[in-house]
Image: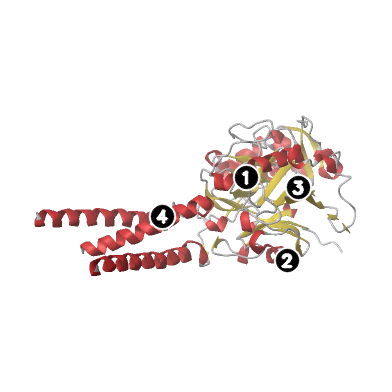
Amino acid sequence: MNKLFHHLTAILGIMFLVFLILDQFNPMMNFVDNNISRWLLGALCVSGICGSVLYRGKGENEG
Amino acid sequence: MKRKYSRIRALLLDAAAAGAALVVFALFHHVLPREQQALNLQTVNTAQAARAAVETAAPQVTAETTEAPVITEATETSETAKATETAKAAETFHPTDRTTASAGKSDSGSRGNPGKGSRSRNSRGGMNGNDKGGSALTDSGAAEEDTAEAVSLSEKFADRFTDSVVVTENSYTSPDIAVSVEKVEEGSLTYYVADIYVRDITCFRTALAGETYGSGFRDSIGDMAALNNALLAVNGDYYGNTSEGVVIRNGVIYRANATNCDVCVLYYDGRMKVMPGSSFSVEEAIADGAWQAWTFGPALLDTDGSVLTEFASTNRIISANPRTAIGYYEPGHYCLVVVDGRGESSGITLPQLSKLFYNLGCTAAYNLDGGNSSVMVWGDEVINNPSGGGRESSDALLIAEVRDYE
């Protein structure tokens, strides 16, 4: 499960980097602030939080 | 070592998955044609509404007033109020009676006075005019709001229109339209200026790709021009790229959620106003009779028609690029400018474009979609040199006859 969130975070992070770069070239395309991007941003946040929690939990268990 | 390769492989797989996800995103964002939910509110020609109010008060004029304004249920109240307010000004511009409110404000400075036919070709000084400096945009192009006198456009632009259709290589005149197109070369810069007089605002039309409002619909400007028998066509604001912003086309409101981008509104009475998105009100647009509205920007001239030197945008956007923009002189008189770039022509920065419109004598100007989108079609051919061969767009601005002339 932890691995899944790591991959998801990496994938969504790469996507948002691309959005931000494209947004610099053409802000009118609204890559960053459209409905789909908002959902993806939410997914990135959830994925990041879950990955962190699982990582912390795993670390405490090992510790 | 094996673990290291495993991590790199996992990262590459993530990158590949991200790429695939981006492709899917792009398909849903702007590639796949998707009809969008539109407001489909009909705006009202306020002159018609005013005439209707006059008719109500004075039934003896009903012979001329059979044309009832189209009023939507959502706007009926405000429209009726507006009609009553403007009843005294019923002489203002009307597509059918062909009269307009003439601006009382005279042009100032060293610029030509384009509305009276005194502007010479030399007044198109391009980038050589004085820079007055800019200030924050509030609301421009509204100088003509105070109607001083009602003057028939036929009289006002009498020397522009002709009784029959007269076509030359770079001009077209008829009883309703006078258009001339000029190619200007200044050093490494090439641009095209279409000077437009219309006696009937409905000659200034817009076309939607696939004749459908939505995202992912794209047509070449040439195809949209041909489909609508346009004399002249340029690309519009590419509304289909985003699901936000004001979209009013030929009197129909498709979208009214203004963003922080400036909005350009062309009214039935021939006025054109450029305003910040925060100042746009759909109720006002309906009540004032909005005929077209575009969301792209920014505004290129200040409230008083002076040059803007600062724009709230990124350097990439402000820097030299191919451009398409619309300029406004007075009701019934406009210009469309397409600037070539990224090739033999260098393109133009936003401050330079502002100065260009100032030198043309415009009182308001608005930047439309540019880059590879910038295309001007005259007759049935693309006359500029679009960057990358041009690209299809979701909408176009057209000048087309509304009556048939043999």
Instruction: Give the letter of the chain under mark 3.
Output: B
The answer to whether any part of residue B96 appears in the image is: no
Residue A17, compared with residue B86, is above or below; it is: below
- Sequence-wise, the earlier of marks 3 and 1 is 3
The chain that hosts pointer 1 is: B
Proximity of marks 2 and 4: CB atoms separated by less than 8 Å: no
Q: Which residue is mark 4?
A: A17
Is B262 left, or right, of A4 in this rendering?
right
* Spatial separation of the CA atoms under disc 1 and disc 2: 25 Å
First in residue order: circle 2 vs circle 3: 3
Pointer 1: what residue?
B264
Q: Which residue is mark 2?
A: B226
Q: How far apart in space, not on screen, are marks 2 and 4 (Cα)?
A: 41 Å
Q: Amino acid at mark 4?
A: Leu
Whether callout 2 and callout 4 share a subunit is answered no
Say the numbered circle drawn on residue B187.
3
Q: Tell me the kind of residue under disc 1.
A: Cys
- Protein chain holding label 2: B
Foreground tag (2 vs 3):
3
Q: Amino acid at mark 2?
A: Ala
